[in-house]
């Protein structure tokens, strides 16, 4: 590359950094929302969550496949030469 292009690239990076810094420093501090006092009533989601019940509780069957025997023929035939 020619030195002229390198100088232009470096100066544009520096200018972009200065513009970014200027915008960050001179930006007004605006709050996106104003904090409100906590409501005395609970929100709808909290009400629904508290009324929710678990219909199966501890009635879910075990689904771990490693607790069961893998080969169904293990008990059916024993090799006499083993």
Image: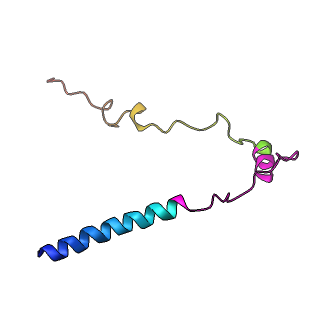
Q: Which residues are magenta?
A: 25-49
Nearer to me, 76 or 60: 60
* Quarter of the image where the N terminus is located: bottom left
Task: Kindly identify the residue that appears in the image at 71 percent across and 41 percent down.
Answer: 54
Q: Nearer the viewer, residue 54 or 47?
A: 47
> Could you say where residue 73 lies in the image, as x and y percent from the top left?
31, 36
| 48 versus 12 height, above or below | above
Q: Residue 36: where, in percent of width, then height?
A: 80, 51
Q: Position of residue 70 (x, y in %)?
A: 34, 36
The secondary structure that dominates the magenta segment is loop
- Magenta run includes residue 17: no
Q: Residue furthest right?
A: 40
Residue at the spot x=67%, y=60% of the render?
A: 32
Q: Position of residue 79 (x, y in %)?
A: 20, 27
Quarter the C terminus occupies: top left
At a point 81% along the width and 47% down the height, the residue shown is 47
Q: Quadrant of residue 77?
A: top left
Could you tell whether 63 is left or right of 9 in the image? right
Image height of 29 relative to 1, above or below: above
Front residue of 49/7: it is 7
Question: How many numbered marks does the figure carry?
Answer: 0
Q: Is residue 37 magenta?
A: yes
């Amino acid at each position: 590359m020619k030195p002229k292009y390198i100088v232009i690239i470096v100066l544009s990076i520096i200018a972009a950094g200065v513009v970014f810094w200027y915008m960050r420093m001179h930006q007004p501090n605006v709050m996106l929302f104003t904090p409100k006092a906590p409501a005395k009533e609970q929100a709808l989601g909290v009400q629904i969550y508290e009324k929710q019940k678990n219909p199966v509780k501890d009635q879910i069957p075990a689904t771990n496949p490693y607790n069961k025997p893998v080969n169904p023929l293990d008990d059916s035939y024993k090799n006499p030469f083993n």
